[in-house]
DNA sequence: CGACCATGGGAGAGCGCTCACCGAAAAGAC
DNA sequence: GTCTTTTCGGTGAGCGCTCTCCCATGGTCG
């Protein structure tokens, strides 16, 4: 080896201690805010810390504390779709993720916990799981919506603290939050009936997602209660383009539809597009109700009447549940269910 | 303390070694793929690893190697805008991020390097910087576009390996990639002239971003060359809504505009919206050219003619530059500039 | 047949931190 | 004034890994 490697290593606890003329422990105490340190000494140590620009070495610390003070937001999704709208585009384009992140940060940041976001298309799950197992993070907020997603169970088996963003496909001893999907769909149904629409249809999400299932069933059940046994429907995949296609399909088969419940705002935006192309006026000819109350709802013309779900609050609750789980690994899994509400705008 | 804390700690190297009947070192060699291990022994060790479900402890390893095998994608943005479209919504809704992530993962995953995404609105920069300094990651891919963003310089001072997604506002000894923004704008200008438009206007991005500046200047310069000394313009902030407003504003002041260059696709989508509301047909009355060639370009009606920038490749190159920087911290900063090209679709 | 060199495996010293424990000094009780 | 209690700082043993030595073994060559 030619050179001894300059290696301007960042200062260590030891060096700060030496400079301040105290022991490692005292510096450690100051850094970790232990109260039993003489104010004067604490002052001196603080100065030494600032002078050296000391930052605790995470690896050394977490080797003993077994904590990293960071959690991952893992977005798990199937990636076997058409390549036209690749996985990463889909998740990063959906307003969903931003709201979840915002809500989670709201509770994590004040606790000094860092949040890192990791996309986890199914083909890359092993990679992500390795990351999680290595102990980079203390726990995970898991966005996973497909029944067949193996990740929730996997994390459970691995005993990695995790909280789900929705009821899991199969029962699992894992905390989750959710919104009353069926109630939301019922709100939409009754609103459409309430404004005098009687030939209703719906565009649902992928039927391998519990949330999509619930919204579809909720809509159907509500209508059944009001005497409408049959509800035409088409299936999308929660993307804008799929909403457009599904709407076209639905109106081709049922041209007389005058009210449409679309299972999320992104698809509803596509639906509006399709209806415009077909020459139908919204809401005059066809009233449209979306789901989510995302920013997309405001960007449409007309703006979307939609079912609001409090995603930020839900994410904040996820974060709280996760922190609880991390500090008490043996505590029971819990679920917290939120209430949707209808937001009236121009489209219905 | 009531219980002794069950603590089902994950197995350690030591335990695997014991089970395999070898020493720590040998197991370590197997795990790190050192060649000088007897195939038979290696086999035995592998089995022990699988049997115990052993996963190396990151903290312990990186304490000695000073590597974490993960890098951060930090998205730095001003957060002092209108709260109507909050920071996190903005970045996660822009198709930009998904493409960057995809491109970066393309080169990082094969290297076994993990990518974590961190939003860093300016008010939370200290928090993110702490994360980076603690050594959670080996380096950072930094998305930062405002001149006034202090983060690039900060990381530079801190000696944290980083690569920028665009030319920095002030010169900095830091690698970056970029696209020839001016050339892209020129492509747009010449295309509009080429299809017979002569009363051109432009909607620019925020003028405190080099990229927005470059696109505006590139457009103006190109037109100047062709004898058009004055180009009306309005300023947006790269969001869809701002594009809509800016377009309205621009057309109010210059109702005779027949060709429009909008500095990104998202704003162009808003422009289309505005033009539709104003009763102008696209492209008959007003031709519109965007910039980016994002998925948004395909979702518009008509689909957008736009300037393509190879974001995926650019991100991949960023990742390569970063890896180079990490393995050779003393190497010189480099810049790699990509070429834009025009993609013709329906809008112009 | 002894000296030599590969080759493969083990021992041991840390990496930088925390935390339980200990000891010295200051404060209070009698 | 002595003895106990309290307060507060220091000591040292690891956390689980990697990596540099160094030693044992066996093959090769003079």
Image (spheres, coloured by chain):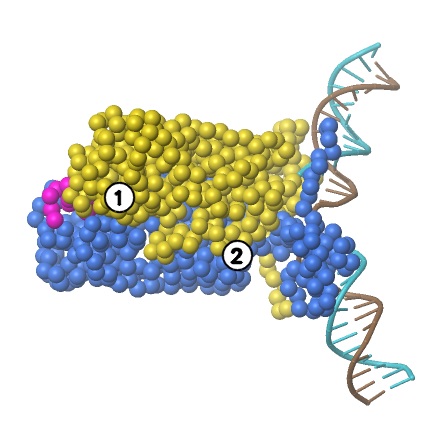
Chain colours: A yellow, B blue, C cyan, D brown
Q: Residue at x 65, y 40 (%)?
A: A65
Position of the C terminus of chain B, as image quadrant, is: bottom left
Residue B325 in view here? no
Q: Assign a secondary structure to mark 1.
A: helix
User: Viewer-proximal residue, A149 or B15?
Assistant: A149
Residue B200 in view here? yes
In the image, taking residue D22 as reference, residue B168 lies left or right, namely left
Question: Does the magenta-highlighted stretch encompass residue B272?
Answer: yes
Residue A116 point in image, percent of width and height: 49, 44
Q: Which residue is mark 2?
A: B113
In the image, taking residue A231 as reference, residue A74 lies left or right, namely right
Q: Is residue A289 above or below residue B163?
A: above
The image quadrant that residue A221 belongs to is top left
Query: Which residues make up the magenta segment?
Result: B270-281
Q: Is residue A66 above or below residue C6?
A: above
Position of the N terminus of chain B, as image quadrant, is: top right
Question: Does the magenta-highlighted stretch encompass residue B167?
Answer: no
> Which is more foreground, mark 2 or mark 1?
1
Q: Is residue A19 above or below residue A227?
A: below
Q: Main secondary structure of the magenta part?
A: helix
Q: Which residue is mark 1?
A: A250
Pointers 2 and 1 in contact (CB under 8 A)? no
């Amino acid at each position: 080896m030619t050179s001894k490697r300059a290696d301007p290593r960042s200062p260590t606890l030891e060096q700060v201690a030496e400079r301040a003329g105290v022991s490692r422990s005292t510096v450690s105490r100051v850094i970790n805010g232990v109260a039993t340190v003489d104010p004067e000494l604490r002052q001196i140590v603080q100065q030494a810390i600032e002078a050296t620009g000391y930052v605790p070495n995470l690896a050394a610390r977490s080797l003993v504390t077994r904590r990293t003070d960071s959690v991952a937001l893992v977005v798990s999704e199937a990636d076997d779709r058409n390549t036209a709208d690749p996985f990463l585009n889909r998740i990063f384009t959906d307003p969903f993720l931003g709201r979840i992140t915002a809500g989670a940060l709201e509770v994590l940041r004040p606790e000094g916990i860092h949040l890192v976001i990791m996309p986890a298309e199914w083909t890359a799950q092993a990679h992500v799981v390795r990351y999680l197992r290595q102990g980079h993070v203390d726990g995970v907020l898991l966005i996973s919506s497909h029944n067949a997603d193996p990740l929730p169970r996997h994390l459970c088996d691995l005993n990695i603290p995790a909280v789900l963003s929705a009821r899991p496909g199969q029962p699992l001893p894992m905390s989750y939050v959710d919104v009353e999907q069926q109630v939301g769909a019922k709100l939409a149904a009754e609103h459409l009936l309430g404004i005098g629409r009687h030939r209703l249809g719906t565009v649902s999400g992928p039927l391998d997602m519990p949330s999509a299932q619930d919204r579809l069933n909720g809509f159907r059940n509500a209508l059944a209660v009001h005497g409408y046994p049959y509800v035409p429907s088409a299936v999308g995949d929660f993307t804008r383009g799929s909403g457009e296609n599904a709407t076209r399909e639905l109106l081709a088969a049922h041209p007389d539809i005058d009210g449409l419940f679309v299972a999320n705002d992104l698809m509803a935006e596509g639906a509006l597009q399709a209806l415009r192309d077909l020459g139908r006026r919204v809401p005059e000819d066809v009233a449209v109700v979306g789901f989510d109350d995302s920013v997309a709802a405001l960007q449409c013309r007309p703006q979307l009447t939609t079912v609001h779900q409090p995603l930020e609050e839900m994410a904040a609750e996820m974060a709280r549940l996760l922190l609880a789980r991390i500090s008490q690994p043996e505590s029971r899994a819990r679920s917290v269910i939120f209430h949707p509400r209808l937001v009236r705008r121009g489209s219905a």
